[in-house]
Amino acid sequence: MNVPTTPDLAGHRALIPGGTGAVGEGAVRAFLAAGAEVIVPTRTEERAQEFRSLLGETADEHLHLVVHDYTTFTGAQDLVEQVVHFRGGLDSVFAAIGGWWQGGTLAEIAESDWSGAFTELATTHMAVLRAALPHLSDAGAYTVVVGDSATWPVPRSGLVSMQQAALLMMQRVAAAESGESRRVFSLVLGPVTSRLAQGAVAAGDIGKVAVAIAAGRARSASIGLHDADEARAALAELQTGVRV
Ligand SMILES: NC(=O)c1ccc[n+]([C@@H]2O[C@H](COP(=O)([O-])OP(=O)(O)OC[C@H]3O[C@@H](n4cnc5c(N)ncnc54)[C@H](OP(=O)(O)O)[C@@H]3O)[C@@H](O)[C@H]2O)c1
């Protein structure tokens, strides 16, 4: 992708829950490349160590990996309060929480499937948004990541479609409620090329779009990033204000 410039986000405090995951890694790298202070909460020490070693020298003093359970209302509230306390505020959130699930038709799912693939993930996203949004400064934005399955029924992965559709509506409601005071985005992704899989849009390009959202003044929106062309067009529009 032809990127004109990397925005300078020195001092910008970006919280990236799910940052240790396939999509989140791209955002972590992009925010670090832009000079931001990047806070990545992760639920286990083991995952924190794995991720630090994966990043190698990229994991410099601007990366703040914290072991913290952010999956409950109190956990997420505590996380955000600690970020505000220790970093002096919060500018952006990039929420790439959760992954894929495949388990059967809606008639076949067990209560444990419902809890794991719907309730727990939706609760985590809601917990992070409600804790972070009131603290978000004017300098950044809240971005939630969903897959195309949010708008397209995927047989035998229906819980993913239902949960992602709920997140998409969460972004729209938060954007409507925020008016001009906060910028709230969703990125609707196609299959992602990452350290774990080959897809149609690169995690690195998704990260660049996330940085452009944070650094720019674009209004709340839902942005489709299904392939490299869409990512290129979104980046150009966010950086120049002109739709290509
Ligand atoms: N990968 C793709 O091709 C693709 C395509 C379209 C959309 N997406 C969307 O992008 C988002 C991230 O997906 P991903 O592929 O990056 O997932 P991933 O590699 O599994 O990473 C997700 C991260 O979410 C965190 N997490 C917190 N609570 C979780 C829970 N209950 N279950 C699982 N993970 C939890 C984990 O971080 P810690 O363990 O460190 O806390 C994990 O690293 C999802 O919303 C997904 O639908 C992904």
Image (spheres, grey):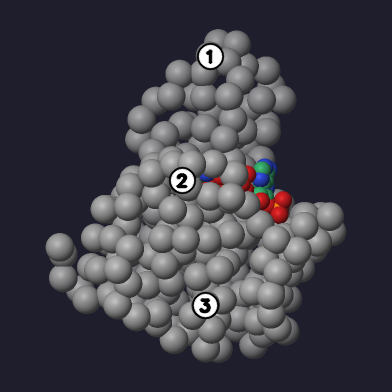
Q: Which mark is residue 57?
A: none
- Foreground of the two, 112 or 17: 17
Give the amino acid at mark 3: Ala
Alpha carbon distance from label 3 to label 1: 42 Å
Give the amino acid at mark 1: Thr
Give the amino acid at mark 2: Val
Which quadrant is the N terminus positioned in? bottom left
The crowding category of the residue bearing disc 3, from other C-alpha atoms within 10 Å (few below 14, some 14 to 19, many at least 20), is some
Question: Image quarter for residue 63?
Answer: bottom right
Q: Residue at x 39, y 49 (%)?
A: 201
The crowding category of the residue bearing disc 1, from other C-alpha atoms within 10 Å (few below 14, some 14 to 19, many at least 20), is few
Between discs 3 and 1, the one toward the N terminus: 3
The residue indicated by pointer 1 is 105
- Foreground of the two, 207 or 114: 207
The residue indicated by pointer 3 is 33
Q: Is residue 50 above or below residue 190?
A: below
Q: Residue at x 44, y 82 (%)?
A: 139
Regarding residue 30, the answer to whether it shows in the image is yes
Where does the image place residue 19, in percent across and percent down from the top left?
62, 60
Between discs 2 and 1, the one toward the N terminus: 1
Where does the image place residue 215, in percent across and percent down from the top left?
39, 79
Q: Is residue 20 left or right of residue 243?
A: right
The residue indicated by pointer 2 is 192
